[in-house]
Image: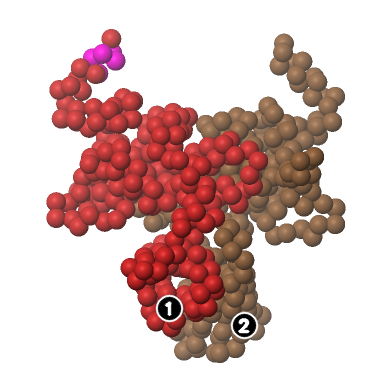
Chain colours: A red, B brown
Amino acid sequence: MKGLLKRLSICFSKDKDLYFAIKNIFGFRPGNIFLYKLALRHKSAALKLMNGEKLSNERLEFLGDAILDAVVAHYLFRLFPLRDEGFLTEMRSKIVSRNQLNLVSRKIGLYDLVTTQRDHHPGKSISGDALEAFIGAMFIDKGYDFTEQLLINKILKVHFDIYELEHKDFNFKSKLIEWGQKEKTPVEFRVLAERGSGHSRQYEVEVLIDHHRVSTAIDNSIKGAEQLAAEKAITALKGLGIEINNHQGS
Amino acid sequence: MKGLLKRLSICFSKDKDLYFAIKNIFGFRPGNIFLYKLALRHKSAALKLMNGEKLSNERLEFLGDAILDAVVAHYLFRLFPLRDEGFLTEMRSKIVSRNQLNLVSRKIGLYDLVTTQRDHHPGKSISGDALEAFIGAMFIDKGYDFTEQLLINKILKVHFDIYELEHKDFNFKSKLIEWGQKEKTPVEFRVLAERGSGHSRQYEVEVLIDHHRVSTAIDNSIKGAEQLAAEKAITALKGLGIEINNHQGS
């Protein structure tokens, strides 16, 4: 009876669209709808409180990121009982990559629910960040076991082809270096600059092919910047008719 | 009655020492003792199976590492409701640092239970790795909620002074650079070598003070190697009577 009353009250609340969107996308009824509203509030549309504090989905994203990592670790642990931890680590980083999370978030329609500032230029990772924040909200609202089951059944099993990912080679840097060795063309990676400190540290890396700069990229780790720059370089070479990327390396 | 029989049977089993050690350290009764035995088996003492597969605690360590990250993220999320995700990220990395995990693992006596090869030179992180693997075993045996409660009540609240950690500055690199600027002495960090690939990639970094090499260090990230090398350099300078480290930077 109480449940019925609650559901009826939702039909007349201003949050009913979000409530039913979540019900449609994930198939569950949110308990505390405010958590999910916060999860879908991008920092460009942060609410400013009286005490100067800003409310956006960034804290929930921190939490959801950790929960997702744990769920994926457990999932892979059971799915590949005979593979070592190096393989599991690599598989997990393929699944939780920014790119994959962005894709899934758009595919399931979560991205369309995100609140951003009207004139905010849409950043690359808003959709993936919102997915992580949503996972954080779900974890607080429904607990770990519920979140794990839902992520496995509605996200991992549906939107990831694990065995395809297993054979997909995301290591653009090593691909580029191998190509250079085969073609006897020098390929170099150089750190151009290091900016900021601590959590906001960023590295800029360039790729030189035959001593000419082909691409640059920025990331918060040197490894990450190298991968991005290598990916760009491979795309640039493709534009020149040089095909490196067979997507089936590993 | 069944529980009593099970407990009685443990008194006569060859695993009773481990069973009671876990009961003493953590205050709970293990369900599947074999998981915990595996968690305490270092790779140097891996069991070789008929099919060539090796059994050690490395896969459980991968899982436990992720569970610990999630538990600490949730703990900090609730403990610091007004701090941003940058602060939470930094606090977590202080808590789950290899050094802290090694210390705790030795303090609670878990390290003494680890099986290694008799002539194995004890690596730096065996004890912290075993703690993570133990967490992985506990998670499989008892579930997330149990593991979270236990880690918070028996480890985080007891063995970590969170507010002291908050003010402790682990950034040895920035400390060394600041000192160099104050003393007008050039301080440089250089990547000397990059070895291996993928998961086993390692970087060697050197610290030059006034153009002389003061220390080198190896780690699987450049950031990590820089921090280790900077810490060594600070210790070396201390040996020369130059005090940099006040431990209260932030």
Few, some or many residues within 10 Å of mark 1 (<14, 14–19, 20+): some
Which residue is rendered at x = 69% and y = 29% of the image?
B32
Residue B233 location, quadrant:
bottom right
Q: Is residue A178 magenta?
A: no
Q: Which residue is drawn at 65% across and 51% down?
A: B128
Q: Predominant secondary structure in magenta? A: helix
Secondary structure state at the residue bearing disc 1: strand
Q: Name the residue type under label 2.
A: Val
Tag 2 residue: B214
Between disc 2 and disc 1, the foreground one is 1
Query: Could you say where residue B67 lies in the image, as x and y percent from the top left?
Result: 54, 42
Drawn side of residue A1 relative to residue A172, left or right: left
Q: Quadrant of residue B37?
A: top right
User: Which quadrant: the N terminus of chain B?
Assistant: top right
Name the residue: 42% across, 51% down. Answer: A97
> Of residues B207 and A213, which is closer to you in this image?
A213
Residue B67 or B180: which is nearer the viewer? Answer: B67
What is the quadrant of residue B54 in the picture? top right
* Residue B218 seen anywhere in this rendered image of the structure: yes
Instruction: Please tell me whether residue B17 is drawn above or below residue A170 in the rendered image.
Output: above
Q: Name the residue under label 1.
A: A208
Query: Which sits in the foreground, B60 or A236?
Result: A236
Q: Is residue B34 above or below residue A224?
A: above
Q: What range is drawn magenta here?
A: A2-6
Identity of the amino acid at label 1? Answer: Leu
Separation of residues labelled 2 and 1 (CA atoms)? 31 Å
